[in-house]
Amino acid sequence: MSGTKRNADSNGCNGTEKDAPPPTKKMSDGGNATTSDDAAPNEQSSKKNDSLTSKDYYFDSYSHHGIHEEMLKDQVRTRTYQLAILNNKHLFEGKIILDVGCGTGILSMFAVQAGAAHVYGVDCSGIIESAKRIVKDNGMEDKITLIKGKIEEIDLPVKEVDIIVSEWMGYFLLYESMLNTVLHARDKWLKPGGVIFPDKAVMYISALEDEQMKFERIDFWENVYGFNMSVLKEAALKEPVVDIVDPKVCFNDVFEGGLARVVCYCKW
């Protein structure tokens, strides 16, 4: 959802200066002729990559359709949003909606189906260009306005919205770090008494002991093809692991009443 700006000339287009000399030819080791211009994009790309942050790579990953396919095929996730929106039409009818991190626009279109007057969808990844086509192909372009940019940097055509919808949850709820963005949108645009979908989440925590996983991910570094790389164990221990575990390795009874329950709110 984020990127770096391209270098452009005075006309706003990429190119070389009018008076620049023609590129000189160079011979590669294979004997094929290349030009100095051929090498320039690689150098620019290298410099561009050096300037990227982890957030840039995070945003860029959402430009690919594959990650959206995975989320849309998660029926538990998508159907829950669909039912939450369509079963609360009385909240959406005639209202202005902000979709934070709209992706393909699926939540924006659910909101229109629920009777929203207008939806503003914001996303900073390249997928928003496809979302515009999707919205048009489904005949909702007069009800949905899609804006490319960061929530923290863009301006909306309206001063406030009635409802904010967002699929901001990542692994273990907070992994994707989008909650701060949703809260920024809430503080900037949500009218008093407005609604956030969702505004409550529950995390369940359990201690576990998985000897096999410990051997594969931690003890592995003690002998790597006969070499001691145990210095990396410290980093491995700090790194969170997203995985499916056998319920038998969970010590649920160490907590009174079973799993520990953590409730998170992001209300107005």
Image (cartoon, rainbow, N blue to C red):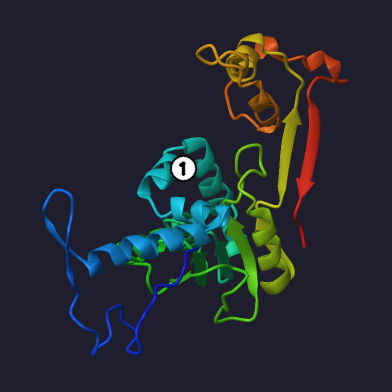
Q: Where residue 95 sits in the image (x, y, percent)? A: 58, 70
Query: Which residue is the site of mark 1?
Result: 71
Residue at screen point 37% across, 44% down? 66
Q: Quadrant of the C terminus?
A: bottom right
Q: Where residue 24 sits in the image (x, y, percent)? A: 18, 72
Residue at screen point 45% across, 55% down? 60
Instruction: Answer whether residue 126 is visible to the viewer in this image.
Output: yes
Residue at screen point 34% across, 84% down? 9
Crowd band around label 1 with a 10 angstrom C-alpha radius: few (<14), some (14–19), many (20+): few
24 vs 56, left or right, is left
228 vs 201, left or right, is left
Instruction: Answer whether residue 102 is visible to the viewer in this image.
Output: no
78 vs 241, left or right, is left
Q: Where residue 19 sits in the image (x, y, percent)? A: 24, 90
Of residues 66 and 107, the one drawn nearer to the viewer in this rendering: 66
Q: Name the image quarter holding residue 232.
A: top right
Instruction: From this view, report whether residue 251 is shown above or below residue 66.
Output: above
**Of the residues shown, which amino acid type is indicated by label 1?**
Met
Q: Where residue 107 sits in the image (x, y, percent)? A: 49, 56
